[in-house]
Amino acid sequence: MRDNTFPTQLTFDEARSIVDTIAAANRLPTERLAIARTHQRILAQDVIAPMPLPPFDNSAMDGYAVRHADVAAGETTLRLVGEQFAGRALGLRVGEGECVRITTGAPMPEGADTVVIREVVRVDGENIAIPAGIRAHANVRRAGEDVRTGDAILAPGQVLTPARVATTASLGIDQLTVSARPTVAVFTTGDELVPPGMPLDPGQIHDSNRELLMGLLRADGLEPTAWPTLPDDPVRIESMLRDAASSFDVVITCGAVSAGEKDHVPALLAEHGRVHFWKVRMKPGMPLLFGELDRARFLGLPGNPVSVFATYATLGRRLLDGLQGRTEPRRQFRARLAAAIDKPHARREFMRGTLEAGEDGTLRVTPDAATGSHRLRAAAMADVLIVVPDGPQSLAVGDVVDVLPY
């Protein structure tokens, strides 16, 4: 019999701190992957530039490589002495009164310091007429102007966006060390749940939480596994959850975490695992359960679909980010309220809303009037969660609030 004493009725900040601590203590191992497989992964190494970017002076435009000293005085005619295309340096040299035809990305010939674009010149055989007003060093990309050898390019904990992966590729790096992705088992619970497409008997509902949670996890770059629905039978619940917890890094359930007669999950976790906390002073999602079972971190989300969304977006995602060592914060905005909010209760509330930018560039957010945690359509029409602080709040139109984009 495990110790059944554990924190309960925590503030949101207290719960978040526990999630961060547990995630940091259970960081997943790293793996070395080809860069083509690292997109959206969390970097687990420093990336130091082994070479400059660009690696050599080159032309930014199609045109003619010249010495600016030859064209500084005004319109000038220069003699064409060669062509330099992108791909291989030909060792060309531009002397006084000479120029070289050049293409974008091609290395600058020795002696040349400026490129005149082809659209402004006149060509007469081997003579090239250059107009007045050419700026020194125009249309030339200098070696190392973007990255110098030895520059710190990326750091552990950063997300490998396409632009970041491309930067490593441009440096000739073909492999990166990243955090392993957590394996995630997903359960929905309740005898009343029926898969979409199946007929409903009286008292039954279609299972929407499975698709909601699987979609949220996939959008975060994970590959979750959906397990069969947990029945309202404590023996079978125990068997199925312990089976998953022996093989997965994270087990997430939806429902059966409140205080009803068929809410068996908290007692099961207290008996066979460890509870870090149960119930958070947040709305929606107060019955949130967090703990450990076998080798898995265990997250028991409430059963109402909007509660599933809010608890995953605020704490579930934070757990998964922390296990992977992500240091970059998720995006958060500040916006002015387009409608007043009157919150009489003390819990922190995550209210659905719609974010828009006004003609003056100011972000404005409109709260959704449908506040019930079963109102999934309202969640589907919104695009942010409005963070309403702890304690009773009377927020007026124009007040500034934090918003979390979906």
Image: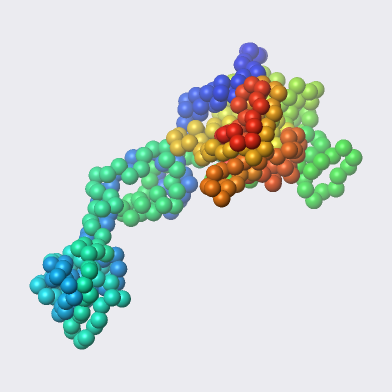
Measured as percent of width and height from the top left, residue 368 is found at 70, 39
Q: Is residue 151 left or right of residue 334?
A: left
Q: Residue lying furthest right in this view?
A: 202
Measured as percent of width and height from the top left, residue 163 is found at 41, 52
Q: Is residue 33 left or right of residue 172?
A: right
Measured as percent of width and height from the top left, residue 216 is found at 61, 43
Tell me where residue 110 sits by quadrant: bottom left
Residue 57 in sight? yes
| Position above or below: 185 against 88 | above
Closer to the camera in the image, 365 or 171: 365
Q: Residue at x 17, y 72 (%)?
A: 74
| Position above or below: 402 against 292 | below
Tell me where residue 311 sits by quadrant: top right
Q: Residue at x 18, y 83 (%)?
A: 127
Q: Identify the image's colour scheme: rainbow, by chain, secondary structure or one colour.
A: rainbow
Residue 291 in sight? no
Closer to the camera in the image, 134 or 271: 134
Closer to the camera in the image, 190 or 361: 361
Q: Is residue 93 left or right of residue 366?
A: left
